[in-house]
Image (tube, rainbow, N blue to C red):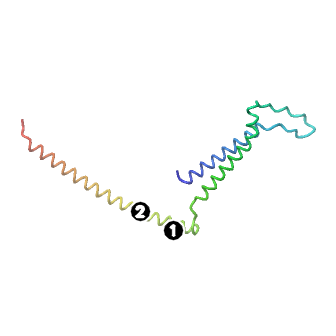
Amino acid sequence: MDIISQLQEQVNSIAALTFNTFGTLQRDATPVKLSPNYPDPPPAPVPPPDDATKFEDQPKLMSAALVKAAKQFDALVAALPLSDGGEEAQLKRIEELQAENDAVGQELQRQLEAAENELRQVQELYSQAADNCLNLKKPD
């Protein structure tokens, strides 16, 4: 997988982690009284004992996962090739690569034509050999 695809995957991963983190925090947060004029919020449902310890660890685990994903993204960005000389140098490099591509394409075309010529010669020789074999057979 190329580095751009890896970067896109990492961005998608960070987005999913962020979405899940905010959703989980919003879902599991205890209600807060906004003003003394409002009635007390209903009590939060008490999680079962097994989930209570998990809830305490969830923000730490989710933030650690987000930080890890961000560091992986930074590592991928650091692995991107640097552009030397700006846009002009990039355009010159593109022209060089295009010229190299054209030269390789012409060489491949020559090799293809040579292979087709050789195939025609082999087919002609095979046809002559088959005709010779048929001519040598005695009729029954």
Q: Which badge, 1 or 2, comes first in the chain's sequence?
A: 1
Measured along the vertical axis of the image, is residue 52 above or below residue 119? above
Estimate how packed mark 1 is, as few (under 14), some (14 to 19) or many (20 or more) residues with alpha carbons within 10 Å: few
Contact, CB < 8 Å: mark 1 with mark 2?
no
- Residue 137 position in % (x across, y down): 9, 41
Q: Residue at x 48, y 66 (%)?
A: 95
What label sits on residue 3 in the rendered view? none
Q: Residue at x 37, y 61 (%)?
A: 106
Q: Residue at x 57, y 68 (%)?
A: 84
- Residue 49 position in % (x across, y down): 76, 31
Observer-nearest of 137 and 10: 10
**Residue bearing mark 1:** 92
Q: Secondary structure at mark 2?
A: helix
- Residue sitting at the far right: 37
Total marks in image: 2
> Label 1, label 2: how many angstroms apart (C-alpha)?
15 Å
Estimate how packed mark 2 is, as few (under 14), some (14 to 19) or many (20 or more) residues with alpha carbons within 10 Å: few
What label sits on residue 102 in the rendered view? 2
Left/right of residue 4 with respect to residue 58 in the rendered view:
left
Q: Quadrant of residue 78?
A: bottom right
Classify the position of the C terminus by image quarter: top left
Q: Secondary structure at mark 1?
A: helix
- Residue 130 position in % (x across, y down): 16, 45
Q: Residue at x 18, y 51 (%)?
A: 125
- Residue 103 position in % (x across, y down): 39, 64
Left/right of residue 76 with respect to residue 123 in the rendered view:
right
Please name the amino acid that badge 1 sits on: Lys
Please name the amino acid that badge 2 sits on: Asp
